[in-house]
Image (cartoon, rainbow, N blue to C red):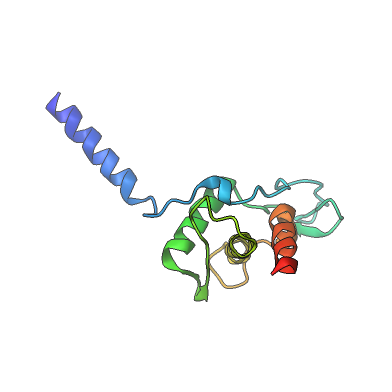
Amino acid sequence: MLTSNILTLLLTTASASSIPSSTIDRSLIPEFGLRAGQSPNGSGSCATANNILIPCFCPPDRGEFVDRVNSAVAAGNVLGTPVTFNVDPLAQSDKDRFDRATTCLIVLQNFNGTRGVGCPAVSVPNILSQQKQFARLL
């Protein structure tokens, strides 16, 4: 019994340490609006609804994306590019929503850990649309 409790405590501690300290409410991160691997053309590219070619691995796994957004917000930047993301779900101003979408796009476009190596904004039409919509209102 004691060994089981110690093992449970160790596993819980290990799991908790890998989670960013400020976990963002997932509802603040817009859905992508597209799934990876749609309409492949045989050369590693896939087509969006507007027939724009993107890498077939785009958009990335949503859970991994949310984790990367969490990490970026906790760090305050992505590869040196500052990001702003109000984590308060009650904060719904045009600026808050624009900043959240912009942060998501910065994370997406640098997703592979190298500046500019990730997925293009057109691979997440809902996030791109939100950014454009709220940019016009600012």
Residue name at image x 63 percent, y 65 percent: 109
Residue name at image x 47 percent, y 56 percent: 70
Where residue 34 appears, x then y in whole percent? 73, 47
Where residue 93 appears, x then y in whole percent? 61, 59
Q: How many marks?
A: 0
Residue name at image x 31 percent, y 50 percent: 17
- State whether residue 120 appears in this view: no
Residue name at image x 51 percent, y 73 percent: 82
Where residue 88 appears, x then y in whole percent? 48, 54
Q: Is residue 98 above or below residue 125?
A: below
Residue 82 relative to residue 53: left or right? left
- State whether residue 124 appears in this view: yes
Where residue 84 appears, x then y in whole percent? 52, 67
Q: Is residue 97 above or below residue 117?
A: above
* Quarter that holds the C terminus: bottom right
Return the residue nearer the eye: 82 or 97.
97
Q: Is residue 114 above or below residue 46?
A: below
Residue at the top extreme of this rendering: 1
Name which quarter of the figure residue 45 lies in. Answer: bottom right
Return the residue nearer the eye: 85 or 79.
85
* Quarter that holds the N terminus: top left
